Image: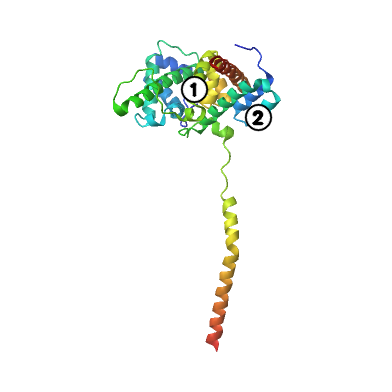
Amino acid sequence: MPQSGPPDPRSTAVLLACARNGESVAREELARRYLVTLRRWAHGRLPRKSRGLLDTDDLVQATLARAFRRLDEFEPRREGAFLSYLRQILLNQVRDEARRGKRIPDMTELPEELPSHAPSPIEEVIGGEFLSAYESALGLLTDGQREAVILRIELGYRYPEIAESMELSSANAARMLVARALVHLGEFLKEKSDGED
Amino acid sequence: MAKIEPDPTLLSVAEAVADGLPVDWPGVAANRPELARHLGRLELIERMAIAYRAVPGGEQGTSWTTVTAPAPALPTRRLLPVAAARWPWIMLVTLAGALLVAALWLALLR
């Protein structure tokens, strides 16, 4: 989802290839292209309590920097895969930040696995337990289904944008992919909750 | 995958969730009680999607707003009854003022 401003003629795939070769302009363009989308996502997932400790933009910039450092290890096939990858890094950053937020008030070191009790805006709506189950179920989907759900539900991409990002034949194909992915996601969530009952 | 071909009802509900369209959850669950649990998960996913849409900070490139954001309510709906309620008072005050001026003129002429 490009930001407003002059459109860059190069595709994300080309920019990624250039970024991998160390081209700073390509990295800056990729960062510019995804900053708003990632910042918005982070706002939803970062506990309100933690948000003031580190600017969300800094968190997103750190995510992008980390992703660029690892471009040699991970070669995204398409924009959707790259965004899914960025989202995972950002999620890890958000979790780290939430834990840090929990530690700061009394400056006491807590175990790494201890989650923050401050809910994020998304957790406030659906609950931490469901969000955790959702993350697990998301991991059970195919790469394509996972990308489709993330792009549409979490990042708010339009169907033509999803089709372009995922190299699908049409917006309708993207729509069908998202719908089927949601049905499968519901099945995995159901199985998980049934198993916990 | 648990199923190759999804249930048509679930698929249509999932399409509505993905499109940001309202779903009659009690109605669908009443028609297909065997899908109640699965529908419950989809409803939570719908809530999550709505929550993501509501997150501030997406001033640029927020696709969701074009899908579901309602048109802003016009203030005239609230203002008009207030203005209408005050109108008789305004007329009364104006009439009283006119009568007062007329009485003063008559007094001066005498």
Which image quarter holds the C terminus of chain A?
Answer: top right
**Image coords of residue A167 (percent x, y):** 56, 17
- Please say if B95 is above or below A180: below
Residue at which label 2 appears: B26
Furthest residue in direction right, as rendered: B31
Which colour assignment does the render follow? rainbow
**Mark identifier at residue A162:** none
> Which of these two is toward me, B48 or A114?
A114
Kindly tell me whether residue A11 is visible in this rendering: no
Both on one chain, marks 2 and 1? no
The answer to which of B30 and B103 lies nearer the viewer is B30
Q: Position of residue B96 (x, y in %)?
A: 57, 74
- Chain hosting mark 2: B
Per the image, the residue denoted by label 1 is: A129
Give the residue drawn at x 59%, y 69%: B92
The amino acid sitting under disc 1 is Glu
**Circle 2 crowding by C-alpha within 10 Å: few under 14, some 14–19, many from 20:** few
- All told, the count of numbered labels is 2
- Residue lying at the far front in this picture: please name it: A197
Q: Furthest residue to the left?
A: A107
The secondary structure type at the circle numbered 1 is helix
| Gap between marks 2 and 1 measured at Cα | 23 Å
Q: Amino acid at mark 2?
A: Pro
| Residue B95 seen in render | yes
Q: Chain of mark 1?
A: A
Residue B18 position within the rendered picture, expressed as x and y whole percent measured from the top left: 59, 25
